[in-house]
Image (cartoon, rainbow, N blue to C red):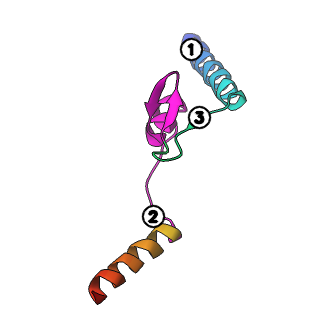
């Protein structure tokens, strides 16, 4: 039990150090693709959040995107 607790604490410490390291760095994001340059490799935002920060994510549609989609549908049906 003690070994499991020590292992969990070590993992928390490592994760905290990694999060602090990333917070202190300037993250380069592509202005067009919104991909993040991670040590010379361009990765998708969801990959970065999931694999690097161990974040759980889900997807939705922003109001702005929904407005654009609805506008495009209306324009297409009027033509």
Residue at numbered disc 1: 7
Mark sitting on residue 61: 2
SS for tag 3? Answer: strand
Q: Earlier in the sequence, mark 1 or mark 2?
A: 1
Q: Are marks 1 and 2 in contact (CB under 8 Å)?
A: no
| Closest to the observer, 30 or 22 | 30
Residue 71: quadrant of the picture = bottom left
Give the mark nearer the N terminus: 2 vs 3: 3
Tell me which label, 1 or 3, sits earlier in the chain. 1
User: Which residues fall within the magenta stretch?
Assistant: 35-63
Nearer the viewer's eye, disc 1 or disc 2? 2
Q: Nearer the viewer, residue 18 or 70?
A: 70
**Magenta residue check for 53:** yes
Question: Which of the numbered marks, if any, corresponds to residue 64?
Answer: none
Q: Report which quarter residue 42 is drawn in.
A: top left
Left or right? Give the position of 25 relative to 50. right
Circle 2 packing at 10 Å, graded few (<14), some (14-19), many (20+), is few
Q: Which residue is depicted at the point 52% across and 39% down?
A: 55
């Amino acid at each position: 039990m003690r070994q499991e607790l020590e292992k969990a604490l070590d993992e928390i410490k490592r994760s905290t150090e990694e999060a602090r390291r990333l917070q202190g760095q300037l993250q380069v994001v592509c202005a067009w693709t919104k991909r993040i340059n991670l040590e010379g490799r361009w990765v998708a935002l969801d990959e970065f959040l999931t694999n690097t920060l161990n974040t759980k994510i889900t997807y939705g549609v922003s109001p702005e995107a929904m407005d654009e989609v609805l506008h495009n549908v209306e324009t297409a049906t009027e033509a």
